[in-house]
Amino acid sequence: MKIRTAEYYVQEVFRSLRRNNWMTFAAVGTVAVSLFILGVFLILALNMNRAASLLESQVQISVYMEDDLDKEEEEALGDKIRALQGIESVKYIGREEARARLSDRLGEQKYLLDALGDKNPLPNAYEVTVRQPDMVETAAKQIERMSGVESAKYGQDVVEHLFDITRLVRIFGVMLILLLGGATVFIIANTIRLTVFARRREIAIMKYVGATDEFIRWPFVLEGIVLGCIGGIISAFVLRSFYAGVTNKVYDTLAFFPLIPQSPFMNYVSLVIILLGMAIGAVGAWVSLKRFLKV
């Protein structure tokens, strides 16, 4: 592409934007609103996925040991558990620590433990975490077969329901993003098609005087990219303010809720939204021009 031709394309883009200012405003507004809605649900889906991952990572196997094991046998059992494939960490919980934890969980009802006196019926145990949540069941079965292990519990029913919920959350998030992404592409492409339709006579005249398809197409494609970029920047700016407000509100009321930190998360989201706007603008203009170039 010659420098003079490129200069003409750029000048034509900005001349067209000024000449069709109302159509430009409508197209940018549509792009910004569509990308903002898509961005909101993208942020929601990513935070839901983060929450699901954190819940899965907190699943632990409680390994209760037989009472007649001595210290060396308990340590040997811990080494065997650590040697299993997929084990992330193994932590020893003595019976006194287990009793203290139970007392904290009982809260105001911890007086129930006083009836036991100096007796402590709780066994020594190991808390085991695995690298992958789907390995919990397999690891628990392997540990339970080891000598010296009374039982290995991980809340089977609760964990299975938890995994079902997190799986549904991820599927729902992906489907939501795909549906909204498709709707956004459709809306923006049709908006750009309207701007092209409004200038169909101009395109026909250029064809009649001998302009090639490429010469006609590129200013419109560049215009679509500019419209998408401006709409994306506006959407990204509003999204950043929106997410900052949401995170502040959530941390004030639900400090424990695992939202993704704003930085660098929103930088990546902003970049994706802007690039997506530019890509949709270019594709929308390219596709919309096809029928009008068949003169």
Image (cartoon, rainbow, N blue to C red):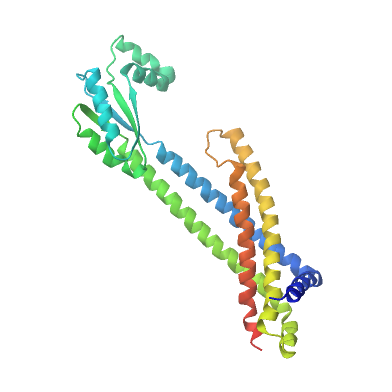
Whole-percent x, y for residue 231 in the image: 69, 60
Whole-percent x, y for residue 208 in the image: 73, 90
Rendered residue at 27%/32% (across/down):
81
Rendered residue at 71%/70% (across/down):
223
Q: Is 263 on the left or on the right of 177, as rendered?
A: right
Rendered residue at 61%/65% (across/down):
279
Quarter of the picture holding the N terminus: bottom right
**Location of residue 224 (image quadrant):** bottom right
Q: In the picture shown, does residue 107 fall above or below 291?
A: above
Whole-percent x, y for residue 130 in the image: 35, 38
- Viewer-side residue, 222 vs 106: 222
Residue farthest front in this picture: 2
- Viewer-side residue, 287 vs 74: 74
**Location of residue 107 (image quadrant):** top left
| Number of marks present in the image shown | 0
Q: Is 68 on the left or on the right of 240, as rendered?
A: left
Q: In the picture shown, does residue 117 fall above or below 73?
A: above
Quarter of the picture holding the C terminus: bottom right
Q: In the picture shown, does residue 148 fall above or below 15?
A: above
- Viewer-side residue, 276 vs 252: 276
Q: In the picture shown, does residue 173 fall above or below 287?
A: above
Whole-percent x, y for residue 33 in the image: 66, 59
Rendered residue at 43%/39% (across/down):
55
